[in-house]
């Protein structure tokens, strides 16, 4: 399987972590990297990725602050964020999920688990987008009433919407 159209942004201040995670995902996704929270925000606002893998412990702007900023913007609030971190206490996990993260990946990185979690959350994102699109186009009684005559609406009600006895 070669590159898909989906884009993964990896944010970590450690080059070794960026390289490792990119090597796990690059056969399946377009991978972009950022070495700081500020550079990540700039890149993400220019070209939002489909998912973000975000380190928590970074200098200047930590992953929690990046997450808060992304979740506060209309352009980026729906992008799934997975924290990739050594912080694995229940309190850290609860805090990250409360801020809007969808999952956690603990360091040291497990390649199979990392790939599986990225795939799962991208699939969930696609299903959510598909569902929202279908809801926009759902045919409702009010929609029909606006485009058909009263006689046609009565026929539709009697033929298709009434309970058979």
Image (cartoon, grey):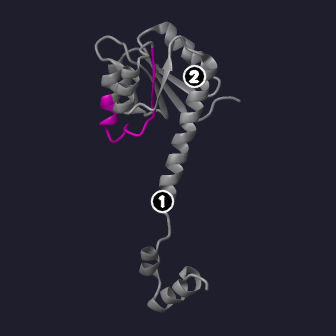
Residue visible at 62% across and 33% down?
A: 4
Residue 61 % position (x, y) = 30, 17
Q: Is residue 37 above or below residue 51?
A: above
Whole-Å distance between the Cαs marked 1 and 2? 32 Å
Residue visible at 50% across and 17% down?
A: 106
Can residue 3 be seen at all in this image of the molecule?
yes
Residue visible at 47% across and 72% down?
A: 140
| Left or right: 36 as drawn, with respect to 130 | left
Q: Residues within 10 Å of mark 2 (few under 14, many from 20)?
A: many
Identify residue for label 1: 135
Question: In the picture, residue 19 is in which quadrant?
Answer: top right
Q: Which comes sooner in the sequence, label 1 or label 2? A: 2
The stretch of residues the image draws in magenta is 68-85
Identify residue for label 2: 114
User: Is 73 inside the magenta-drawn segment?
Assistant: yes
User: Is 154 inside the magenta-drawn segment?
Assistant: no
Q: Is residue 126 above or below residue 71?
A: below
Q: Secondary structure at mark 2?
A: helix
Q: Is residue 162 above or below residue 10?
A: below
Q: Secondary structure at mark 1?
A: helix
Residue 64 % position (x, y) = 33, 23
Query: Which of the image's four quarters has the N terminus?
Result: top right
Q: Looking at the picture, tell me which residue is in the foreground, 62 or 149.
A: 62
Can residue 26 be seen at all in this image of the molecule?
no
Query: Which of the image's four quarters has the C terminus?
Result: bottom right
Q: Residues within 10 Å of mark 1 (few under 14, many from 20)?
A: few
């Amino acid at each position: 399987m070669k590159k898909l159209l989906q884009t993964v942004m990896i944010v970590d201040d450690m080059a070794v972590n960026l390289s490792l995670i990119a090597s796990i995902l690059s056969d399946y996704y377009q991978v972009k990297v950022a070495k700081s929270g500020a550079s990540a925000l700039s890149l993400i606002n220019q070209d939002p990725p489909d998912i973000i893998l975000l380190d928590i412990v970074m200098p200047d702007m930590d992953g929690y602050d990046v997450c808060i900023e992304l979740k506060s913007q209309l352009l980026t609030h729906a992008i799934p964020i997975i924290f990739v971190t050594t912080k694995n206490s229940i309190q850290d996990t609860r805090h990250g999920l409360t801020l809007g993260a969808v999952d956690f990946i603990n360091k040291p990185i497990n390649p199979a688990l990392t790939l599986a979690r990225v795939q799962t959350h991208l699939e969930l994102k696609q299903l959510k987008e598909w569902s929202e699109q279908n809801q926009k186009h759902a045919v409702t009684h009010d929609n029909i009433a606006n485009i058909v005559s009263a006689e046609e609406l009565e026929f539709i009600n009697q033929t298709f919407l009434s309970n058979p006895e």
